Image (spheres, rainbow, N blue to C red):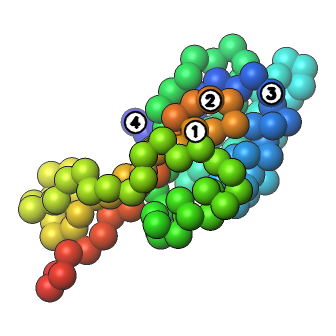
Amino acid sequence: MRFVQVAQHADDLQRAAAFYAALLDAEPSALFDPPGLLFFDVGGVRLLLEKGAPSSLLYLEVADLDGTVAALRRRGVRIIADPHIIYAHEDGTLGPAGSEEWMAFIEDSEANTVGLVSRIRTAGD
């Protein structure tokens, strides 16, 4: 099995389309309105934004967490939690051994929380 699709609540599809297009640096892959379905491709998994969907906590991997958060802050995006270390991966159980997992949390255009994740190699690895 593999993930095919994840849904996220969106009250305003146009506003959500603009927010996620900028965040993902990608245009929507499909819009069906009616009934009100907006899709993005995120690494081969469909992100569905829909009024009837519940709010989910999405985690998106970014290459430069500090830079991404700074750019979002300049755009006026609400930063819920600045970048901080979550976990040091001593073995490969949850991530690459010898790396640290850093996260920040933002609020999207629809008042959902989105986690941003970077895995950073520790010194000497």
Would residue 98 appear left or right of 39 to someone viewing this image? left
Question: Mark 2 highlights which residue?
Answer: 111
- Residue that badge 4 annotates: 1
- Looking at the image, the residue that sits furthest to the top is 52
Q: Position of residue 24 (x, y in %)?
A: 65, 55
Q: Earlier in the sequence, mark 4 or mark 3?
A: 4
**Relative height, residue 92 to residue 111 (above, below):** below
Label total for image = 4
Please name which of the two marks, 4 or 2, marks the residue nearer to the observer: 2
Is residue 45 visible in the rendered structure shown here?
A: no
Answer few, some or many: residues within 10 Å of disc 3's Cα (few below 14, many 20 plus, some between 14 and 19): some
Instruction: Work out which residue is located at the far right of the displayed protein and give it.
Output: 34
Identify the disc placed on residue 107: 1
First-in-chain label (1 vs 4): 4
Q: Are marks 1 and 2 in contact (CB under 8 Å)?
A: yes
Q: CA distance from mark 1 to mark 2?
A: 6 Å
Mark 3 or 2: in front is 2
Q: Which mark is drawn over residue 12?
A: 3
Judging depth in this view, the residue of 99 and 69 nearest the camera is: 69
Between disc 4 and disc 2, whose residue precedes? 4
